[in-house]
Amino acid sequence: MAMWIKCKTPGVRFRKHGTRKHGVKFDQYFSIRYRVNGKQKEEGLGWASEGWTESKAAATLAELKANKTVGRGPMTLSEKRQQEQAKRKGEAAKQKSLEQEKNRLSLTLMDKVFSSYCADNSHKQSLKAEKSCYENWVQPSLGQKRLDEIVLLDLERVRKNMSKAGKSARSIQYIKAIIRQLFNYAIERDLYSGTIPTKYFLKKQKIDNRRQRYLSPEDADILLEKIREVSEQTYRICLLSLNTGMRFGEIASLQWHHVNTVQRSITVLDPKNGETRNVYMTDIILDMFKSMDAGPPTDLVFPSKRGGKMQSISKTFARSVETLGFNHDITDRRMKVVFHTLRHSWASWMVNAGIEVPVIAKILGHKSLVMTMRYSHVNDTSVRNAMQVLDQQQSRSSEKVLGITPGS
């Protein structure tokens, strides 16, 4: 073994490697010698090729002696190494924690939350519309922001962009609902624990998005006739909605075992409000189902051309409405004829026929009577009769106040 060579600094020495060189010199191994509890102790430091030098060794020895003098800190090289190892472990744990937090925060990027939300809600009928709205209005401004970075001002910018583009107040409300859903989704999965910034967004905005247009029975007949010229299935779907008030999604999900011509009932499973209900068949709907070739119990009654579930009403409907001019020169969406107008018309016809609102609400599947009133209208004759009563009352009051004698 190579001889130990003393350095200029007392307590520091080294020995040379027999063959290995570091630079132009043979590699050197350094050690330090000092007294601990009255006993001489020597501990190796390391090779010059590992970064050790005489000055570094001297500094290490001086540190241990200083610690011993003040009675604080590591007083031996092994204690110093244990402390350094613990420090490295602590720093590694801290770094790991920071990385984990960074990864967790990356999951709260609005884009990633929306992507996860879509994966978990692929069954939603409204998902396609939500994706379109998100990509057009939310993603450009908020997609790369974390949820905890989004504030009310960010939402106001989205509103401003939509308003400039001519989007309706209802469309902006829909965007608010989507953003609120994403925050709630993140909260449920412990990705977010703060407040939801939509709380005060559009707080003072009141929107009347109630459909004001409904078809008269005569207009409905004309529309059905025009649709039937092109598509028997679209005609049947429209006829069913006009006679039951069923939503398009409910009709598209209808399977043959939901249709009972013996009891004249249609079972509506998993509707919009989540409560299954039964719908009564009118004579015309009963005849319609009897004229159709029923398929296996779980087959769709009204499948798409590809055999799956229809996602929207056939374009035949919109083309027929356009041909008949029902929406000619109409710009207010509330006054346009759309498929939902059929459900709206049915509810209005029921009210005009004197059917009580709670009964209509049950048939439509509404939990709230307020919701039913959004669809119901009274006809012009009812309004005219009510105003005539008011005229008569005012006339009698004026005669009394002015002292006018009837017939004078």
Image (spheres, rainbow, N blue to C red):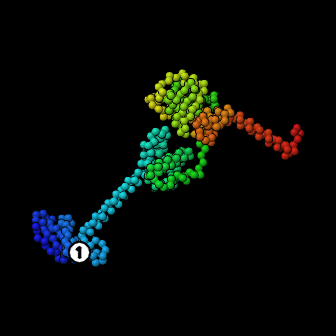
| In the image, residue 219 above or below residue 58 | above
| Direction from residue 91 to residue 178 in the image, left or right | right
Per the image, label 1 sits on a secondary structure element best described as strand
| Direction from residue 36 to residue 200 in the image, left or right | right
Around disc 1, counting alpha carbons within 10 Å, would you say few (fewer than 14), some (14 to 19), or many (20 or more)? few
Percent position of residue 137, x then y = 48, 47
Query: Circle 1 sits on which residue?
Result: 36
Q: Quadrant of residue 70?
A: bottom left
* Identity of the residue drawn at 10% across and 63% down: 19
Which amino acid type is shown beneath numbered disc 1? Answer: Val
* Identity of the residue drawn at 48% across and 43% down: 130
Image quadrant holding the N terminus, namely bottom left
Q: Look at the image and tell me whether residue 39 can be seen.
A: yes
* Identity of the residue drawn at 51% across and 26% down: 233
Percent position of residue 306, x then y = 44, 29
Percent position of residue 43, x then y = 20, 70
